Amino acid sequence: MKFSDFDLKKTGDGLLPAIVQDARTLKVLMLGYMNEEAFEKTLSGGLVTFFSRSRNRLWTKGETSGNYLRVVEMLPDCDGDTLLVKAIPDGPVCHRGTTACFDTPEDEGFIRSLSALVKERREKMPDGSYTTSLFIKGPKVIGKKVCEEAAEAVIEAVDGNRERFIYEASDLVYHLLVLMEQQGVSISDLERELALRHR
């Protein structure tokens, strides 16, 4: 991929819009602009670098705060006029000290929505809810369900039954989310632990 591959006629100023996304959580973090020099520096150095229109110079994100954006992957869009940069942030991305420059909820994605619903069930404990019944029975019963669903998922995997595996793995994820909520553990806690191991 080269800077010259992009069609920058639409922007009018020869700058390439670059959307930065967290490579681990898929949260959209910020939008910046790159000229050819910023693009090449980002490619070669591995740290997201923009062209600052207000300062009229190159600007490596994190050069003053230390909260760099470490490039994992760079992808052009279908029209060749925008760049998606998947990166791992070293800290808050926004100058306000927030995770991102966009005020989107932290609990994006269906599994996070399901996790939020499980949390709501624990707080409200509505009658007739299967999730409520699990919380009433406690961690021993929830843990037993996690073990059962894990075993069933493995059996379907060994048997090569993809559709049944998806079904049982979905049950496993749901019951694990219930156990995590019972233990006061969030998806973000798991992401942090896995990220530490990955480093």
Image: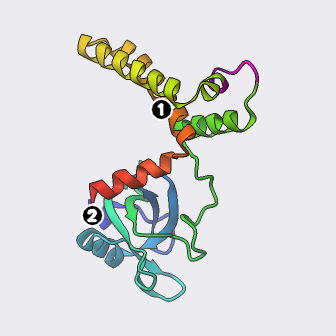
Question: What is the distance, in whole Å, between disc 1 and disc 2 at their CAs?
Answer: 44 Å
Residue 38: percent from the left, percent from the top?
A: 35, 76
* Of the pair 67 and 122, the residue shown nearer to us: 122
The residue that label 2 is drawn on is 2
Q: Which secondary structure, mark 1?
A: helix
For the point 50% across and 89% down, the residue is 55
Residue 61: percent from the left, percent from the top?
A: 42, 76
Residue 128: in magenta span: yes
* Of the pair 26 and 186, the residue shown nearer to us: 186
Residue 76: percent from the left, percent from the top?
A: 37, 54
Question: Can residue 155 be seen here?
Answer: yes
In the rendered view of the protein, which quadrant contains the C terminus?
A: bottom left
Establish if 86 lies above or below 8. Answer: above
The stretch in magenta equals 127-132
Looking at the rendered structure, the kind of residue marked 2 is Lys
Answer left or right for 58 relative to 136: left
For the point 67% across and 26% down, the residue is 132
Structural crowding at the residue carrying mark 1, measured as other residues with C-alpha within 10 Å and reported as few (<14), some (14–19) or many (≥20): many
Circle on res. 176 = 1
In the rendered view of the protein, which quadrant contains the N terminus?
A: bottom left
* Of the pair 129 and 112, the residue shown nearer to us: 129
Residue 77: percent from the left, percent from the top?
A: 41, 51
